[in-house]
């Protein structure tokens, strides 16, 4: 703006003043509605880098971000700001598509049994302490394609699949107990033979999560 308009920084100051004023109004409204303390901060730079930097600087327990931002073409090529924050920051990130119109009743938590599974479930329970939880792990039989190609009998493959499903149930139950979920507060799903993303979306829609 300085280079193009040659206004001595007046336009830049005006834009920053407007941003700060809108941020202040949002902070004031949010603080009043939820009775919480809010600290405001406006910085310059690449959004993804600055969000990740400040989250580390403040040792944030959670980053909350909307899902809208870059235009369609930019999102298609490099992802939205929210998606890039998830990739760059080591902190937990909650991406919010729209405001909840009521308390969360059914929360779907996909789990891959990596070291991030337990913290993810803990955060979900903290966000929705009174909800029913749907814990999902998509079971894949290791080397199933190779086994079929090698002519291994289908009953043998099904035996492996059943064993994998039993193991998945055991781990789901362990994670649920670790997060303080009693038997009546969670339902497990161990779909097989389907891409995980598809199973997650299908269960979400069928159960109206």
Image (tube, rainbow, N blue to C red):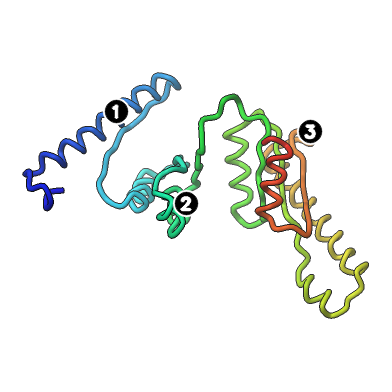
Closest to the camera, between mark 1 and mark 2, is: 2
Which element type, helix, strand or loop, lies under badge 2?
Answer: helix
Q: Is residue 89 visible?
A: no
Query: Quarter-wise, where is residue 16 in the image?
Result: top left
Rendering coords of residue 72 (x, y %): 43, 51
Rendering coords of residue 6 (x, y %): 7, 48
Q: Which residue is mark 3?
A: 184
Question: Residue farthest to the bottom?
Answer: 150
Q: Which mark is residue 24?
A: 1
Earlier sequence position, callout 1 versus callout 3: 1
Which element type, helix, strand or loop, lies under badge 3?
Answer: helix
Q: Which residue is mark 2?
A: 83
Query: Quarter-wise, where is residue 112 in the image?
Result: bottom right
Residue 129 or residue 195, whichever sits in front: 195
Residue 206 or residue 27, whichever sits in front: 206
Which element type, helix, strand or loop, lies under badge 1?
Answer: helix
Q: Do the residues under discs 1 and 2 have CB atoms within 8 angstroms?
A: no
- The vertical placement of 138 against 175, above or below, is below
Callout 2: few (<14), some (14-19), or many (20+) C-alpha neighbours within 10 Å?
some
- Residue occupying image coordinates x 38% and y 26%: 37
Rendering coords of residue 129 (x, y %): 63, 31
Earlier sequence position, callout 1 versus callout 2: 1
Q: CA distance from mark 3 to mark 2?
A: 34 Å
- Residue occupying image coordinates x 63% and y 51%: 117
């Amino acid at each position: 703006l300085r280079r193009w308009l040659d206004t001595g920084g007046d336009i830049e100051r005006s834009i920053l003043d407007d941003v700060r004023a809108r941020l202040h109004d949002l902070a004031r409204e949010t603080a009043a509605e939820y009775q919480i303390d809010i600290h405001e901060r406006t910085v310059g730079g690449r959004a993804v880098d600055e969000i990740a930097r400040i989250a580390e600087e403040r040792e944030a327990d959670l980053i909350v971000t909307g899902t809208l931002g870059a235009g369609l073409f930019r999102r298609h090529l490099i992802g939205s700001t929210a998606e890039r924050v998830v990739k760059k920051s080591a902190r937990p990130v909650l991406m919010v598509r729209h405001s909840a119109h009521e308390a969360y009743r059914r929360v779907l938590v996909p789990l891959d049994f990596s070291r991030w599974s337990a913290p993810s479930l803990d955060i979900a329970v903290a966000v929705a302490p009174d909800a029913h939880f749907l814990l999902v792990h998509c079971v894949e039989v290791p080397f199933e394609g190779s086994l079929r190609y090698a002519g291994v009998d289908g009953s043998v493959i099904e035996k492996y699949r059943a064993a994998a499903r039993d193991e998945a149930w055991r781990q789901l139950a362990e994670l649920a107990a670790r997060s303080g979920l009693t038997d009546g507060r969670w339902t497990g799903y161990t779909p097989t033979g389907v891409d995980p993303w598809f199973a997650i979306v299908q269960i979400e829609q069928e159960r109206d999560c």
